[in-house]
Amino acid sequence: MNQPAPQGRKQRIIIVEDNALVAKFFQMALERAGGFSCLITEDVPGILREVAAGEVDLVLLDVSLTNAEWDGRNVNGVELCRLLKEKSPRRLPVLLATAHAMSGDRERLLESSGADGYLEKPVYESAQLVAKVRELMA
Amino acid sequence: MSAPVPSQPREETFIEEMKRYLHLGENDAILLKRLLPRLEKHLPEMAERFYAQIPHHPGASRVFTGGQAQVVRLKSTLQAWGRGLFNGVYDEHYADDRFQIGFRHVRIALDQKYVISAMGVVRSFLQEKMFDEFPNRKERLAYSQALSKILDLDLNLMCDSYFRATMAHLQTLNQELAQAGLQLAEANAIKDEFLAQVSHDLRTPLNSILSFTKLVLDGLCISPEEEKEVLRDVFSSGQLLLRLVNDLLDISSIEAGKLALQLEELDPRAVLDSTLPLVAVQAASRNLRLVDETLEQQLPLVRGDEIRFRQVLLNLLSNAVKFTPSGGVAIRATVDHAQGFLRIEIEDTGIGIPADKRDSVFEKFVRHDPAALSGITGSGLGLAIAKRLVEMMHGKIGLEGGSKGNGSIAWFTLPLASHAQPPEARPA
Ligand code: HEM
């Protein structure tokens, strides 16, 4: 069961996902793969602070969010993505998680958010998630 | 024609066009006016002839609902109508009067065929009398033609009233149909939305079951404890899925009118006592006080379905527990003898619901839980089901703000057995 973690600094991933179980799966899949340390949160100011400090290596972002607030209103993944890109001092890859039903809108979402890639939910294969994350970080 | 030509060409009215078509001109009007003194004396006989026909036709005679008196009156009405044929003024008022007579027959649902045939009886009777009045063929001809034209005109007006009434009826039907179409489209849109929501809600726990099972199968857990934890998530997702499917079956059988309730006299005490323990565990695990304030009370019998009463209570109680992070949940009961109902209240010290959202929580799939407090949410159908069940038991349900400014009070009523009894079960 054990997977040895590679030496050196772990790469920091923020998971913004309103379904706690889905978020938990993302975290476990990435952390078990090794080399990643994940934070699950919908706290937008907190996320922006870390991003502005240049401490984040990738953000995994769900398109539909329930509790993410900015400027006194709810924001979705697309808006949050633009905000992240704007505040980040360095290249910050963002992986947008989209629900299966949204397939028609995917290209439009990618374009309007400025995200670097998308992940089609549901994800059952942890390897698929890890591969996608590694690809964006390369 | 010396009349000034109107700048805007006006559309010809029905009677104007028909007069033109029948060549009914001023000359005919003069002739018809002259005919009145010659034919008036025959009108009583015409009325007799007219009514002699009707008893042989059940479809025609069934419209006489006023007995002999009505027939007597109608005979003189028919004579008045006959005199009107010879008034010489065939204008819009004339047409209007005739249309009204026509509509009168439409309203009593007299088939058009009888009116047309009756007009034939009138025609042959009057033409027959023309032979007596004008033995000279040459003299008779012009008068006879004028009479024929006015009878044609009247027949046309009579038939057109039937046509107009039919068109008006069709128009009403069309409007009703369009309205029904709109309602159907709306209902369909709601159904689509419902379906989309249901498939999303079914997929969410299913996805968790699949992804976590795969995680374990891939050997990605670092310890047996973690494996257990992950399996617990799988298990609770399965439970959620089951709950959702059960709720869906409930709501669809309620909406299809297939859920039969067994309404009988119930002791609310027994229902409360058997339901509270089911949420007590849940409450205790979250350190919430669960207080039954009805224990000291003598509760009257109510009328309801025992299983559904318990289901409503359980739905409201577990909702209260679920959305109360700290504090407690209290159960209260009040009896309104005047109105004849028992009111059960469940007050929590939870997150509460804004006043303007309180009605909508009873709609399908409206959730006000700020998503996934624990990653596990209800089906979103619990309150919708509770509302329908309470209403099927002739009670009411609602949500109010908590008495201390926070939390909320969910309440429902059930009719008292002493009030709601069907007549045959009422004690003598
Ligand atoms: C040439 C054909 C007919 C003419 C000119 C005629 C004329 C009239 C007139 C002037 C009225 C009074 C309308 C009013 O009060 O608004 C009337 C009413 C009525 N007619 Fe006729 N009618 C005709 C054929 C028939 C036939 C064939 C029947 C039945 C078989 C019939 C049954 C009645 C009845 C039941 C009423 C309503 C009487 C009431 O108000 O109580 N009519 N008709």
Image (cartoon, coloured by chain):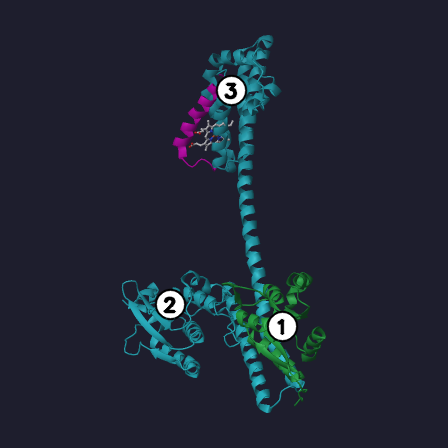
Identify which residue, B198 or A86, lies in the foreground.
A86
In the picture of the structure, the residue carrying the numbered disc 1 is: A59
Q: Which residue is mark 2?
A: B412
Mark 3 nearby-residue class (10 Å; few <14, some 14–19, many ≥20): few
Which shade of the palette goes to chain B? cyan
Note whether B215 is above or below B166 in the view shown.
Answer: below
Name the amino acid, label 3.
Asp
Numbered disc 2: what chain?
B
- As drawn, is B385 to the left or to the right of B155? left
Dot 2 beta carbon under 8 Å from ligand 1: no
The CA distance from mark 2 to mark 1 is 47 Å
**In this rendering, the label closer to the viewer, 2 or 1:** 1
Q: Quadrant of residue B8?
A: top right
Q: Nearer the viewer, residue B398 or A36?
A: A36
Mark 3 and mark 2: Cα distance apart in space: 69 Å
Q: Which residues are magenta?
A: B62-86
- Please identify which colour was used for chain A in the image: green
**Mark 3 element type:** loop
Residue B373, image x, y percentages: 50, 75
Residue B228 image offset from top left, x and y in percent: 57, 88
Residue under pointer 3: B91
Query: Which amino acid is tagged 1?
Result: Val
Q: Chain of mark 1?
A: A
